[in-house]
Image (cartoon, rainbow, N blue to C red):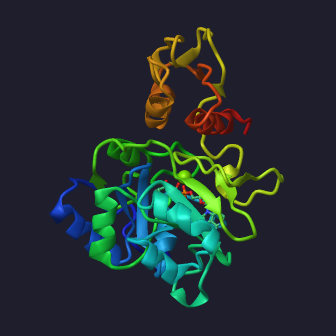
Amino acid sequence: MALYSGWMMKEATRILPFDDAAIAEAARLVLAGQPVAVPTETVYGLAADATSAEAVARIYEAKGRPSFNPLIIHVSSLEDAELIGVVPATARHLLEMHWPGPLTLVVPLRAEAGIASIVTAGLDTVGLRVPAHPAMQALLRAVGRPLAAPSANASGAISPTRAEHVLKSLGGRIPLIIDGGATERGLESTIIAATGDRLRLLRRGPIDVPDAVTETRRKIEAPGQLASHYAPSKPLRCNVTEAAPDEFLVGFGDVAGDVSLSRSGDPVEAAARLFDLLHVADDAPQSRIAVAPIPDEGLGAAINDRLRRAAAPR
Ligand code: TXA
Ligand code: MG
């Protein structure tokens, strides 16, 4: 199949430390239609040219991701975002406050924007984000096109917060990983929909948007809300203060555990370490994972949301 006769599985994945030469090489690959892994302030993304359906198909190919999942498009500025989506006045203040940063806005797509329909999985809406990380910003400038980028992990696996996580999940399936060290936030962006009269919260994340209504309907609009989306390979139990002998315990605050999300009980530190420690737990000799209770406020609620999905039966 011509579409899939790309790079996959022919060479080893290269890792280059973030610098000008690495960005130039990443831009060359992206313009040649290849996806490359690049750090953002949230998690590592697998970035491809959003105007090329083949390039975006290679994201799905590398991730093994179901084709109905729409992807977030990354751009350099609010002005560039407005070339792709229709930003309503009700959302503008949010973007002015939080961009560049870990906030994704879902808005009506401009049909003339030239975005490959595979990016939005055929939807007439589009998720847009201006990332804050210098590596992703540099890549956007070097490529000069919008970049579709889901988290750089195999479908259903834990989101990567380090270059090594990407390598473990996608090694041999992508040509290049830009290594920018551990990501600052460690949680995917907050997703807000601005497609109706009111702002709606589609995914919790680092940014709190008090004037957005939480979706209560059962309808799944963002596939990231699927129960088992954020899942380690082992069974996971939440709210555990004493682990069973076959459990690896991820602690928090007073619950020490085998490792701790935050000994001081700081939800910001816990969020930044969450996926890292789920990877550690998944690699531990114990057959199950247990996680200590985390107060259900602010970022704690976002962490618990991730953990509930990881704990969901599948
Ligand atoms: O922090 C992040 O957002 C990271 C970094 C790489 O930017 N990206 C990320 O992408 O988490 P991904 O593909 O793993 O998650 C994107 C989420 C999915 O749940 C998807 O369904 C939702 O965004 N989404 C994208 N476009 C949408 C749309 N038009 N309507 C509803 N949901 C949408
Ligand atoms: Mg993901």
Q: Position of residue 137 (x, y in %)?
A: 32, 64
Q: Nearer the viewer, residue 268 or 36?
A: 268
In-image side of 13 versus 59 (left or right)? left
Q: Is residue 188 visible?
A: yes
Q: Position of residue 123 (x, y in %)?
A: 68, 75
Identify the image quadrant of residue 172: bottom left
In-image side of 270 versus 108 (left or right)? left
The number of discs equals 0
Considering the image in quadrants, where does the C terminus appear? top right
Q: Residue furthest bottom?
A: 112
Identify the image quadrant of residue 168: top left
Relative to 202, does residue 91 appear above or below in the rendering?
A: below
Residue at image coords 54%, 64%:
93
Residue at image coords 38%, 79%:
145
Residue at image coords 61%, 80%:
109
Relative to 8, does residue 228 appear above or below in the rendering?
A: above
Q: Position of residue 193 (x, y in %)?
A: 66, 63
Q: Position of residue 197 (x, y in %)?
A: 75, 69
Q: Residue furthest right?
A: 217
Relative to 232, does residue 103 appear above or below in the rendering?
A: below
Relative to 295, does residue 150 appear above or below in the rendering?
A: below
Q: Is residue 176 visible?
A: no
